[in-house]
Amino acid sequence: NILHEATGTGIGTKGDTKTINISAISGGYSLTDTTHTGKIITYDAKTTQTRGNVVTSTSTLFNTTTQRAAVDAHYYADVVYDYYLNTHNRDSYNGKGAAVESVVHFDKNYNNAAWTGQYMIYGDGDGVTFSELSGAKDVIAHELTHAVTETSSNLVYENQPGALNESFSDVFGYFVDPDDWLMGEDIYTPKIAGDALRSLSDPAKYDQPAHMNNYQNLPNTKAGDWGGVHINSGIPNKAAYNTIQKIGKVKAEKIYYRALTQYLTTNSQFVDAKKALVQSATDLYGATEAAAVTEAWNAVGVT
Ligand SMILES: O=C(NO)[C@]12CC[C@H](CC1)C2
Ligand SMILES: [Ca+2]
Ligand SMILES: [Zn+2]
């Protein structure tokens, strides 16, 4: 029921004004961005655990308080879509122009966000640990990268492959949002300034290991976070930081994308990621860049 594409004005979760791609429908407008092969569509679950309904407005303004989370989810999804298309020539998360669907106000006080395999879900947070989780560009890039990973290497979400899955999402979160080495700083603990969920430059700042000597052998259970995927990601995150410091973001992101989509497989371990990245560096650039990757991983104890 799309009549034509239009340009809208939205207010985001930080009270900021953003220009968004919307569609004219009968009776008004919807958060449906048709400027790419894959439509970007944003839904409101209204605190249920369903996909809910597409967010609409009777005008091109999406400026109500309840629409703020949707405006950010919609806007940042477009930013990440553009990043993968323009930097890596990947059309949507699957490279085949899949629609990108996001759901906001998922569940009640939900302190999390995820890629469900069909769409992204964003909780509102409880206002203490998290504010609305679609309010951070690096988080949306993190979630959409889970979809990129799932449609390429499909690293299994447990133990070392799971920590790599998590790390690649954090690292592409940095590539999309390279203002800092932090993950989730814009939505984490809204009442406390200057902290973050994770740091790529200093994983230990937020209790993550930055070296294999501190690898956490946790049980492969929900309670063990599937073998500590969110804690052990500190080690490959630190290796990525080391790599970017040595060879720069432009080369590093090409090397990381090639490794993720051409070399890694479901059960790749840390040492396989090191090999994949060294091989990608050699393929794309040469011995200097390959040596930098080798040193970056040696420094975190993956030898
Ligand atoms: O690391 C994550 N998911 O695998 C997080 C946890 C809090 C932010 C939203 C989702 C990052
Ligand atoms: Ca950040
Ligand atoms: Zn994740």
Image (cartoon, rainbow, N blue to C red):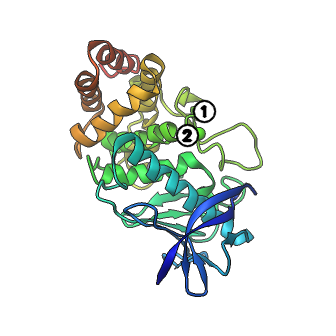
Viewed as shown, does residue 78 lie left or right of 278?
Answer: right
Residue of label 2: 177
Question: Residue 83: percent from the left, percent from the top?
Answer: 45, 45
Residue of label 1: 180
Q: Is residue 32 above or below residue 199?
A: below
- The total of numbered circles placed on residues is 2
Question: Residue 177: percent from the left, percent from the top?
Answer: 55, 40
Q: Quadrant of the C terminus?
A: top left
Find numbered disc 2 in the image and state the secondary structure of the residue it sits on.
loop
The amino acid at mark 1 is Asp
Q: Is mark 2 within 8 Å of ligand 2?
A: yes
The answer to which of 278 and 249 lies nearer the viewer is 249
* Residue at image location 35% in from the left, 32% down from the top: 254
The answer to which of 213 and 2 lies nearer the viewer is 2
Q: Quadrant of the rendered structure where residue 6 is?
A: bottom right
Category of crowding for the residue at label 1, using alpha-carbon neighbours closer than 10 angstroms: few (below 14), some (14–19), many (at least 20): few
The amino acid at mark 2 is Asp
The answer to which of 148 and 76 lies nearer the viewer is 76
Q: Is residue 224 above or below residue 200?
A: below
Whether tag 1 and tag 2 are in contact, CB under 8 A, the answer is yes
Distance from disc 1 to disc 2, alpha carbons, whole Å, reads: 7 Å
Q: Is mark 1 within 8 Å of ligand 2?
A: yes
